[in-house]
Image (spheres, rainbow, N blue to C red):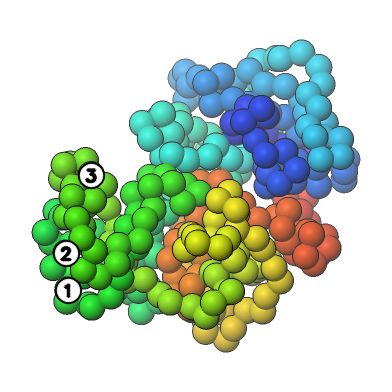
Amino acid sequence: MKRFAFVMDPLEKLDLPWDTSLCLLRKLHARGHETYLFLPASLSLEGGKVRGRGRQISPRGEIGDRHGPEKAFDLAGFDAVFIRKDPPFDQSYLALTYLLGPLVKETVVINHPQGIRNANEKLFGLRFGRWTPATLVSSDADEILSFQRKIRSDLVIKPLYEKGGKGVFLLPRNRKGARRFLIQATRGGKDPVVAQKFIPVPKGDGDKRILLWKGNILGAFERIPRAGEFRSNLSLGGRFSACGITKSEKALVRDLKPALLREGLHFVGIDVRGEKLIEVNVTSPAGLVELDRLYGKEPAKKMILDLEKL
């Protein structure tokens, strides 16, 4: 029997049937392991020791039931600690990665706190230019519009630290009032945004979420946006369906693997559109429930077996 700690958001904030953290908890608990929930605010660091107040959680069905009183724990006593707090990656999230940093000398932390800091989800893929669409990162509205004129394309504008499509919008070529929209998006030129070439796909298609464990593919599914929406996030009404993985996408994963492993980023979800890498999710990647619904329990089996070998 192993003991696993999950540092994550409160249960009441989660979409219980679809939450990947709870899916992992359910799988580990079903195999006889102990699972514990810690809220980020419960953690403290003193003398290099990370402590927290947590509860053992025994998931039942699709709903997590907390059992037993809240107790104080030394997190080094767990076989692995999962960082599963959802973005935004704000100052409190940054502080959490520093607080958990010393723990990597004592036990396994997934994903590595420093790796999470190093791998901004919107920017990490730009290390692999051959796989990404034409992209500019800037807080200057005029520079973004100049970039758009140069590449002659609609642009996808993304904030750097949000999730679930929040703050993402499509900027068509020659959009009236485009400069005003960009000034708002950058908070008057204070915040850089990602301006990325929009990749058209056939009607009824979307993008792919490919889940990786230790740089290897667990599985993939297509995310198809609802009518009238270009963002395919499931939280925005997108739907998911089974899909294949192309030779090009497999080559992309092979290229990413060494960098992911160097950063200690073992559980990752990459988003691919038209065989181009558009995002690398490392803070709290989702998709295990979708893989289960589409393909049964096999996609996560390798992950669970590896965790049992710790």
The answer to whether 309 appears left or right of 197 in the picture is right
Q: Quadrant of residue 127?
A: bottom left
Image-based side of 253 in relation to 157, left or right: right
- Position of residue 280 measured from the top left corner of the image (x, y, whole percent): 47, 59
Bin the neighbour count of mark 2 within 10 Å (Cα to Cα): few under 14, some 14-19, many 20 and up: some
Nearest the viewer among 76 and 303 is 303
**Residue type marked 1:** Arg
* Chain-order first, disc 2 or disc 3: 2
To which residue does mark 2 refer?
Answer: 145
Considering only vertical position in the picture, is 300 above or below 49?
below
Q: Which residue is mark 1?
A: 149
Q: Earlier in the sequence, mark 1 or mark 3?
A: 1
Residue type highlighted by circle 3: Gln
Quadrant into which the N terminus falls? top right
Residue depicted at 81% across the width and 17% down the height: 68
Are discs 1 and 2 less than 8 Å apart at CB?
yes
Where in the figure is residue 296, as x and y percent of width and height? Answer: 83, 63
Disc 2 marks a residue whose amino acid type is Leu
Q: Which residue is mark 3?
A: 184
Is residue 297 at all visible to an observer of this figure? yes
